[in-house]
Image (cartoon, rainbow, N blue to C red):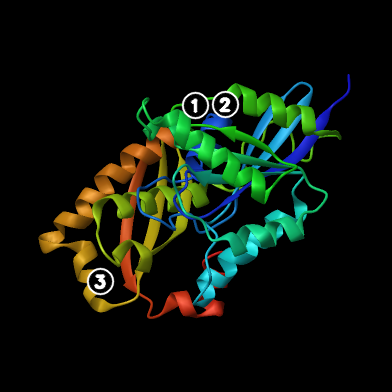
Amino acid sequence: MNHKSGFVNIIGSPNVGKSTLMNSLVGEKLSIITKKPQTTRHRILGIINRSNFQIIFSDTPGMIDPVYPMQKIMMQYIEKSLEDADIILLTTEIGKIEDISIFNYIKKKNKNVPIIILINKIDKIGSLYIENTLYDAVNYWHKLFPFSEILPISALKKMNQDLLMNKIISLLSEHPPYYPKTYLSDKSERFFVNEIIREKIFFLYKKEIPYSVEVHTKLFKIQNAFIYILSYIYVEKDSQKGILIGKKGNAINKLKFISIKSIEFFLKKKIKLKFYVKVCKNWRYDYKILKYFGY
């Protein structure tokens, strides 16, 4: 039996639904999802395995003009995704005004790689206006990418997902699996623990707190019926540490409670979770510290 494999990399601006799309396609929640932009910081692979194909989806940070070192590293993940892509899912949002220079860069970088333009979030549009709005959006993207297929989708509602999957499979080349067929991702369980906790921080805290936080799990030990997890939560300022902990520890206890529920659901095992909150000043600007955190 002929076997197909390939890297299908999801590229786009912040908050257009890239993580929702990959989770929906893979059928597992691998990338964290919030309503706030620039939630994804790493390149995360989600792998679909079938008897005759393996699709390696890649979720990437939103494309921005980087300012500080962490953002520069995030953009390097996108650069790598553009280099090793077999198919690019260029994801945009209906009604969103995009930075054209970014997409011109993608065209220049990937002359021989198939690009599928995905116009996401079409479920948000009222039925009376969807036809004209979609017509305008398709024309807009056709002018920018005249040789690319354009597909309106809703990652949240899984609209046109079967069409997208069929198109991806048709474009894949014959190749043995890149990863063992049992793999769901290239990331470790510790990584996903970090991401789940960070997602809950985005959910519970406001303003600069979620963007100033990094989570680093130092202990992940399976013993008897439990997994014992020790995670350090790093902030940039003493004042942020106080906000994260809250009065009499109320905020951090709430974070711990909702984190445990989600981690147990993901790992399918009971856990014992402990937090330490530490100040690591300006960690987003220090390449040495960023490397320690896994960037």
Q: Read off the residue under disc 2.
A: 161
Q: Spatial distance from mark 3 to mark 1, Cα to Cα?
A: 38 Å
Which quadrant: the N terminus? top right
Nearest-to-viewer mark from 3 and 2: 2
**Which label belongs to residue 240?**
3
Q: Amino acid at mark 1?
A: Lys
Residue at 60% x, 33% y: name it.
Answer: 151
The answer to whether the residues at label 1 and label 2 have Cβ atoms under 8 Å apart is: yes
Find residue 125 and report its horizontal and vertical position in percent: 38, 33
Q: Along the horizontal axis of the image, is 280 left or right of 101?
A: left
Q: Secondary structure under badge 2?
A: helix
| Res. 68 in view | yes
* Location of residue 139 with respect to 156 vertically, above or below: below
Q: Is any atom of residue 295 visible in this view?
A: no
> Which label's residue is closer to the chain start, 3 or 2?
2
Front residue of this view, candidates 34 and 11? 11
User: Is 265 drawn above or below residue 288 in the view shown?
Assistant: above
Q: Amino acid at mark 3?
A: Gln
- Residue 158: which disc? 1
